[in-house]
Image: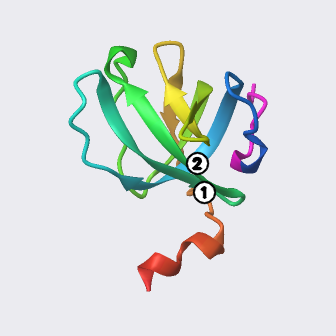
Amino acid sequence: MEPQLTKIVDIVENGQWANLKAKVIQLWENTHESISQVGLLGDETGIIKFTIWKNAELPLLEQGESYLLRSVVVGEYNDRFQVQVNKNSSIEKLSEPIEVGLEHHHHHH
């Protein structure tokens, strides 16, 4: 059964739980020992920062690939929302790539 999906544009509440289908737009250098990966996720409605905690023990995401991220929790940092992937979350690679809103592609030209 498909989980109830949240669009990135609908992430509006700190502490909210979400299921996202999104593409990994960018992975950032991360030196924090409690964090596994940090970067940007995108769907057709927007982009959002994500953090995957080490103790989630999830496989590493690949830049440019699309995933279904289940049971992620929304956090707020510097007045911006971000998605936190923890040990209650699960990640599944999608065979169909997610379209990312075109307005965010200007840095690729």
Check disc 1 and report its element: helix, strand or loop.
loop
User: In terms of image quadrants, where is residue 104?
Assistant: bottom right
Q: Position of residue 87 (x, y in %)?
A: 46, 13
User: In terms of image quadrants, where is residue 47?
Assistant: bottom right
Q: Position of residue 75 (x, y in %)?
A: 59, 29
Q: Position of residue 72 (x, y in %)?
A: 59, 26
Q: Which quarter of the rendering shows the N terminus?
A: top right
Identify the residue at image location x=69%, y=60%: 44
Question: Identity of the amino acid at label 1?
Answer: Ile
Q: Nearer the viewer, residue 25 or 14?
A: 14
Most distant residue in the front direction: 78
Q: CA distance from mark 1 to mark 2?
A: 6 Å
Question: Identity of the amino acid at label 2?
Answer: Ala
Q: Which residues are magenta?
A: 1-8
Identify the residue at image location x=64%, y=38%: 20
Q: Earlier in the sequence, mark 1 or mark 2?
A: 2
Q: Position of residue 84 (x, y in %)?
A: 51, 28
Identify the residue at image location x=29%, y=21%: 34
Q: Would residue 28 be visible to someone looking at this image?
A: yes
Q: Which quarter of the rendering shows the C terminus?
A: bottom left
Check disc 2 and report its element: helix, strand or loop.
strand
Identify the residue at image location x=75%, y=36%: 5
Discs 1, 2 touching: Cβ within 8 Å: yes
Instruction: Give the answer, above or below, for where 57 lies relative to 36.
Output: above
| Magenta segment includes 53 | no
Most distant residue in the bottom direction: 109
**65 with respect to 95 (left or right):** left
Please give the label number shown on residue 98. Answer: 1
Please give the label number shown on residue 22. Answer: 2
Q: Nearer the viewer, residue 85 or 21?
A: 85
Question: Within 10 angstroms of label 2, few (less than 14), some, or many (20 or more) residues?
Answer: many
